[in-house]
Image (tube, rainbow, N blue to C red):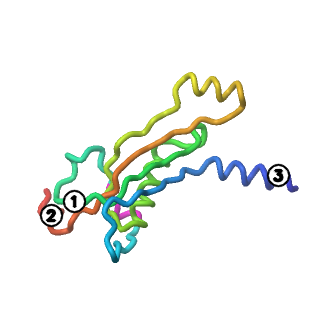
Amino acid sequence: MKQLLLVVLASTTIACVSTNATLLNPTPSGRAPIAENQVRIFRTAAQVTGKYEEVALLNSTGESNWTNEQKMMESMRKKAASLGANGVILDDIKEAGAGAKVAAAVFGTGTQRKGRAIAIFVFPDSAAKAP
């Protein structure tokens, strides 16, 4: 029974994507957290139609075999929402190279998928003017 519990705990831990944030311009009061579904994902800064402020750098990591880009973006969205940011500009999502995957298979270890983004706050008055 203990072994089964350990396997279940290990697989749920491995399957997780973790995202950390480095605040860029901390405000004394901070921003209130918002709902995750209020955070928009942008592929480039040019897609943001309005004035915005950069809130934090986001870095995500997850086991390549157990995660995908969607889970990376969901984790980034969740972290941005907790910071009160209403947007995320994607920077880069990197897959492990072929050599790393072969080495991982030989040694029985995992490879990491890594993603970077910028959490932003789009000011409401400028977003309202956007088409």
Q: Nearer the viewer, mark 1 or mark 2?
A: 1
Q: Which mark is residue 66?
A: none
Q: In the rendered view, would you say 101 is above or below 37?
A: above
Q: Amino acid at mark 3?
A: Leu
Label 1 vs 2, first from the N-terminus: 1
User: With 56 as the anchor, is 66 left or right in this view?
Assistant: right
Main secondary-structure element of the magenta-colored stretch: helix
Label 3 vs 1, first from the N-terminus: 3
- Crowd rating for badge 3 (residues with CA inside 10 Å; few <14, some 14–19, many 20+): few
Give the residue number, with chain letter if any, for mark 2. Answer: 126
Asked if the magenta segment contains residue 35, the reply would be: no
Q: Are marks 1 and 2 in contact (CB under 8 Å)?
A: yes
Residue occupying the point 39% across, 66% down:
83
Residue occupying the point 39% across, 71% down:
33
User: With 83 as the anchor, is 105 left or right in this view?
Assistant: right
Q: Amino acid at mark 1?
A: Tyr
The x and y percentages for residue 126 are 15, 64
